[in-house]
Image: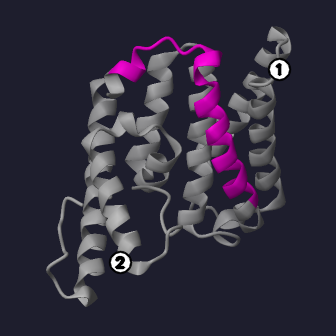
Amino acid sequence: MAEDIATTSYETKELSKFIRGEFVWVRDRLYSISEWFADEIRREALSAFSCIFDAIHIDDEKLKSDLLLEGYRISTKLINLNPSSKILSESASEKEVGYMISWGYWGRFIFFLLNNQCSFAEKQIYLCASKYPLVAINLFPGAFFGEHFIILDQVTKEIQKRISLPDAVNLNISVLDCSALPSNIQVPLLEIQFEEELERLANFATRKLQEK
């Protein structure tokens, strides 16, 4: 459960497998969308990624700290991007900007995680999920989202099975059993459930923030 994770001491060695897996996911997507953004923003995002990636592999504590701080600084700039600003609206959609902002929250999450600031790390998850639930549930550990992750996981599997696109969504989601319905309406019904559950997830994240 999220409570168990949130109260665990976050030692770097305990998180190495999770963090390195996360970096593979983020690296691939960060490079794939970099063309959407102005050069300055692209450089900023890639720089933050590089700083945090190097930090988790370096043994020197002073250098590790410096790199994490730089990654934190850049990540904080990313979460403050304005999706409706002229420079961004000309080069990317609001949804695409949302991905970059979400990676800013992810960078801050890793920073607080590695500095044993569990409460602040958890807050980044819910800040991201309250605004960009679909990105958040792909970026962060599913245990923080409880039943919402389980439902979305099951529905996604059902959608993937019916449209035969295994890479359509990077999750799992079959609370709604459409197997007895005509195939032409199964996917739309599942997609409706998917969107409704994402909205519930965003509301859940907002409530979690209010509790803190």
Residue 64 shown left or right of residue 26 in the figure: right
Residue under circle 2?
162
Query: Image point 59% across, 70% down: which residue?
Result: 93
Q: Are marks 2 and 1 in contact (CB under 8 Å)?
A: no
Please name the residue that numbered disc 1 is placed on: 58
Separation (CA) of disc 2 from disc 1? 45 Å
Residue 61 on image: x %, y %: 80, 10
Indicate yes or no whether the magenta region holds residue 30: yes
Where, by quadrant of the figure, is residue 206 drawn?
A: top left
**Quadrant in which the C terminus is drawn:** top left
Q: Quadrant of residue 39?
A: bottom right
Q: Residues within 10 Å of mark 1 (few under 14, many from 20)?
A: few
| Location of residue 190 in the rendering, given as x and y in whole percent from the top left corner | 27, 71
Is residue 89 left or right of 32 when viewed as pictured? left
Residue type highlighted by circle 2: Arg
Compare marks 2 and 1 and give the one earlier in the sequence.
1
| The N terminus, quarter of image | top left
Give the residue drawn at x 69%, y 46%: 24
Residue type marked 1: Ile
Going 65% across and 69% down the picture, which residue do you hit?
92
The secondary structure making up most of the magenta span is: helix
Nearer the observer, 200 or 175: 175
Magenta residues? 4-31
